[in-house]
Image (cartoon, grey):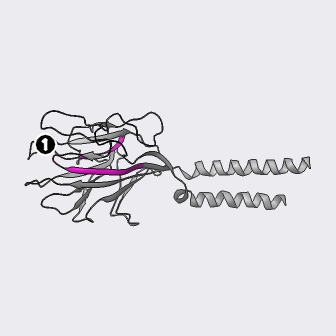
C-alpha cells in the first residue's frame, strides 16, 4: 500500500508539471470599466489588483484638448491638431508592472476605436507592455521594442493592425467592430518570446523572439490624436514557472501522506 501511495504521488507530480502551463493562471490585474462616464479614469482602482495600484491616465481638460480617459473606458475626441504627431488627443493609461523571469504573462483587452468625421488618416488605439518612458500624454512609442499592438480605424483604413517588438509587423486588415487582442509574453528562456493573438484565434498573428529583452515597468493602453471609442475587459494574468507548481503540489501530496500515516497509527 505504501508503494502505491508513493507511486501515486510521483505520478501526480509528473502530471502537474506537464499540465501547469495550460491549467493554472493567476490574475494580476483585471478591469471591466464599470465606472462612470463622468469620472476620470486617473486615480481609480482596477477591479483586481495585487496591492493598492491605481490607473495613471491622461487628465488634460484644457480648452480643445481632450486626452482624457474615463472610468467607463471611453475616450472622447480632440478638436485640435489635425496633422502631425503633436495632436492634443494623445492620451494613455497605465498600471505599474515589472515581469519576473520564468513565467508566462497574458495581457488582453477589447479595443473599439472609432474615427471622427473629416480627413483623418491615422487614428488608432494601442495597448501593451511599456517602459517607464511612456507617459500618459505622449504619442504611443511605436518605435519601442516593447510588446504592443495598435488597432487602426480611420477614413482610409477599414481596420489595420501593427505588432511591436523591435521590427513592427503589420496586418492589412482585421475583423470589424470591437476586437479582442492578446499579447503572450514568455520569460522562461534567456531570450524572451512574445505571441500576438487576434479575435480569439488559437494561432498567433505574429511572433517574436527577443535578442535583447525589453525593459517593462507598466502595462496599459492609449489613443492617438482624434481617435475616439472605448476599451473593455482589460486583464493581465500569469502562469508561474512549472517548478513552482510542482513544489506546491508535491508539498500537498506529502502532507496528505503524513496525515494518512498518522491516522492509521492512531487507529
In the picture, measured across the screen, residue 129 lies left or right of residue 124, that is right
In the image, residue 254 lies at what x, y percent? 74, 49
User: Magenta segment, principal secondary structure?
Assistant: strand
Q: Quadrant of residue 136?
A: top left
The span picked out in magenta is 217-235
Residue 1 visible in the displayed image: yes
Q: Residue at x 23, y 65 (%)?
A: 173
In this view, the residue in front, 241 or 160, is: 160
Is residue 147 toward the left or the right of residue 27 in the image? left
- Name the residue that disc number 1 marks: 87
Q: Is residue 234 above or below residue 52?
A: below
- Counting from the top left corner in percent of width and height, residue 29 is at 43, 44
Left or right side of 258 for 168? left
Residue name at image x 9 percent, y 43 percent: 81
Instruction: Label 1, secondary structure: give it.
Output: loop
- Number of other residues with Cα within 10 Å of mark 1, as a class: few under 14, some 14 to 19, many 20 or more: many
Q: Quadrant of residue 39?
A: top left
What residue sits 24% from the left and 45% below the top? Answer: 75
Q: Nearer the viewer, residue 244 or 46?
A: 46
Q: Position of residue 54 (x, y in %)?
A: 38, 35
Query: What residue is drawn where x is 57% and y is 60%?
Result: 19
Q: Is residue 226 magenta?
A: yes
| Magenta span contains residue 224 | yes
Q: Is residue 39 above or below residue 232?
A: above
Q: Foreground residue, 138 or 67?
A: 67
Q: Is residue 215 visible?
A: no
Q: Quadrant of the N terminus?
A: bottom right
Q: How many discs mark residues in the rendered view?
A: 1
Q: x, y (%) of residue 206? A: 32, 61
- Residue 78: image quadrant is top left
Q: In the image as oriented, which residue stretches furthest toward the right?
A: 267
Amino acid at each position: 500500500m505504501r508503494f502505491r501511495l508513493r507511486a501515486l504521488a510521483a505520478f501526480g507530480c509528473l502530471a502537474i508539471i506537464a499540465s501547469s502551463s495550460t491549467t493554472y493562471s493567476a490574475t494580476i490585474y483585471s478591469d471591466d470599466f464599470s465606472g462612470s462616464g463622468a469620472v476620470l479614469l486617473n486615480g481609480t482602482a482596477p477591479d483586481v489588483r495585487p496591492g493598492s495600484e491605481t490607473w495613471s491616465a491622461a487628465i488634460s481638460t484644457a480648452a480643445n484638448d481632450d486626452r482624457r480617459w474615463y472610468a467607463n473606458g471611453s475616450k472622447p475626441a480632440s478638436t485640435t491638431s489635425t496633422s502631425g504627431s503633436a495632436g492634443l488627443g494623445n492620451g494613455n493609461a497605465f498600471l505599474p508592472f515589472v515581469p519576473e523571469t520564468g513565467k508566462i504573462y497574458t495581457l488582453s483587452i477589447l479595443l473599439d476605436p472609432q474615427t471622427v468625421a473629416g480627413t483623418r488618416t491615422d487614428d488608432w488605439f494601442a495597448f501593451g507592455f511599456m517602459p517607464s518612458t511612456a507617459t500618459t500624454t505622449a504619442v504611443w512609442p511605436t518605435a519601442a521594442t516593447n510588446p504592443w499592438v495598435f488597432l487602426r480605424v480611420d477614413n482610409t483604413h477599414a481596420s489595420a493592425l501593427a505588432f511591436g517588438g523591435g521590427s513592427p509587423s503589420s496586418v492589412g486588415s482585421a475583423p470589424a467592430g470591437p476586437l479582442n487582442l492578446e499579447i503572450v509574453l514568455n520569460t522562461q528562456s534567456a531570450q524572451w518570446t512574445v505571441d500576438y493573438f487576434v479575435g480569439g484565434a488559437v494561432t498567433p498573428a505574429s511572433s517574436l523572439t527577443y535578442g535583447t529583452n525589453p525593459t517593462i515597468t507598466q502595462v496599459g493602453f492609449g489613443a492617438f490624436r482624434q481617435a475616439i471609442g472605448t476599451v473593455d475587459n482589460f486583464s493581465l494574468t500569469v502562469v508561474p514557472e512549472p517548478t513552482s507548481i510542482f513544489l506546491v503540489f508535491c508539498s500537498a501530496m506529502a502532507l496528505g501522506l503524513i496525515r494518512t500515516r498518522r491516522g492509521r497509527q492512531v487507529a
